[in-house]
Amino acid sequence: MAIPDEVDEVKAALAIEDGTFVEGRGFGAEGYVEGELVFNTSMTGYVEALTDPSYAGQILMMTYPLIGNYGVCEEDFESDGVKVEGFVVRELCRDPSNWRCTKGLDGFLKEYDIPGIEGIDTRALTKKTRVYGAMKAVLAVGDYDKGKMLRRAVEQPSITELDLVDRVCVSEPKRFEAERGKYEIVLIDCGIKMSIIRQLLKRNMNLTLVPYDYPPEKIRELDPDGVFVSNGPGDPARVKPTIETIKALAGDFPMAGICLGNQLVALALGGKTFKLKFGHRGANQPVKDFETGRVFISSQNHGFAVDEGSLKGTGLEVTQINLNDRTVEGMKHKDVPLITVQYHPEAGPGPHDTYFFFDRFREMVGEY
């Protein structure tokens, strides 16, 4: 059981590019951070969200009002540490209760030098984001200057101007061996979640994790049974090395992609992507699968989507759609072994409805 965090009243503020300025109580580390303010509707899973590399460049706001009540457990990490730029909650629980808990959320954010703010109206900010879209913001804990914060909120670069993948991927190949490894898979790391690695290992796949800019000729030298493209942060159009790698390898190996990987496959084969107004972030997104007619609930975290109208002539066909806004949630190629999904089938957190995607990939690898 974690020791309760001491209550230390520190002032904090959040400034948004539209001129909104709110003040609250600070937690975590003191200092300024900037990024795109986005919201996540999950009721649980804040540890997984905080450590998800796809949140690089973003200030994360949880819509559920009480966060931190079950503390922090390292088994829930999706990477080697916190990847969000800052954290926004309505109320922080400083006395967590959970037999797995090793530390409180305040101390956890301090450990990774990440500021947080509580005591503000996250419901109003979420409604504003839904109306006007995700906006640039600045979060400050400790001493701050309102005018400076508002200027920085406006002047900072858009997330579409940032190269974020290089911050969160491996720099050298890394090996993971399954207990009964049967297949060899090259996993292109654009900011992968550990839950994806665990799901592939469970299906008897040995994994070689390589950087997003690993040359396609070196992947060929590894002679894999399949290639898998991971999730990751930012605008897919900026991840040009991975786009070129997919273009070079598609059709030569069974291939799959998740989230950013889905978008990169579309771009590599001639499709287009676009920025969503406020994105899909939560564990309750309904998706319909055209091949089975089934509707399932999925876990999602993305701010960009594939333009369905741009897929004509690419060989890709849509297999799944989001029932909230009809955006593309899955694709497959008509002629070569290639499947993708936009949501997170590994969950972490979220429902396990979509684990079958990993089974489909394993079957495809086995066939080819």
Image (cartoon, helix red, strand yellow):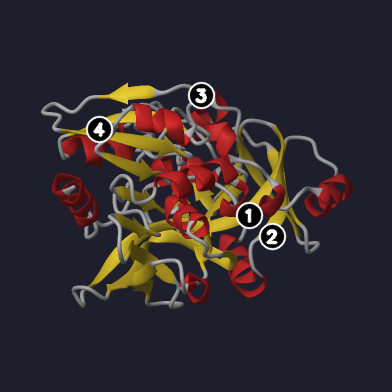
The answer to which of marks 2 and 4 sits earlier in the sequence is 4
Residue 251 locus on image (x, y percent): 34, 51
- The quarter of the image holding the N terminus is top left
Q: Amino acid at mark 1?
A: Leu
Q: Residue at the spot x=13%, y=26% of the render?
A: 179
Name the outermost residue toward the right.
147
Q: Nearer the viewer, mark 4 or mark 3?
A: 3
Q: Which residue is mark 2?
A: 135
**Residue density around tag 1, few if under 14, some if 14–19, many if 20 or more, within 10 Å:** many
For marks 4 and 3, give the CA distance. 36 Å
Question: Relative to 128, is 253 on the left or the right?
Answer: left
The answer to which of marks 3 and 2 sits earlier in the sequence is 2
The answer to which of marks 1 and 4 sits earlier in the sequence is 1
Whether 132 is drawn above or below 304: the answer is below
Q: Which residue is mark 4?
A: 99
Q: Residue at the spot x=73%, y=35% of the render?
A: 142
Question: Relative to 319, is 179 on the left or the right?
Answer: left
The answer to which of marks 1 and 2 sits earlier in the sequence is 1
For marks 3 and 1, give the CA distance. 28 Å
For marks 3 and 2, give the CA distance. 31 Å
Q: Which residue is mark 1?
A: 37
Q: Amino acid at mark 3?
A: Ser
Q: Nearer the viewer, mark 2 or mark 4?
A: 2
Q: Which residue is mark 3?
A: 171
Q: Amino acid at mark 2?
A: Met
Would residue 179 be seen by someone viewing this image from the given angle?
Answer: yes
Res 322 quadrant in image: bottom left
Question: Do tag 4 and tag 3 residues touch (Cβ < 8 Å)?
Answer: no
For marks 2 and 4, give the CA distance. 38 Å
Res 145 quadrant in image: top right
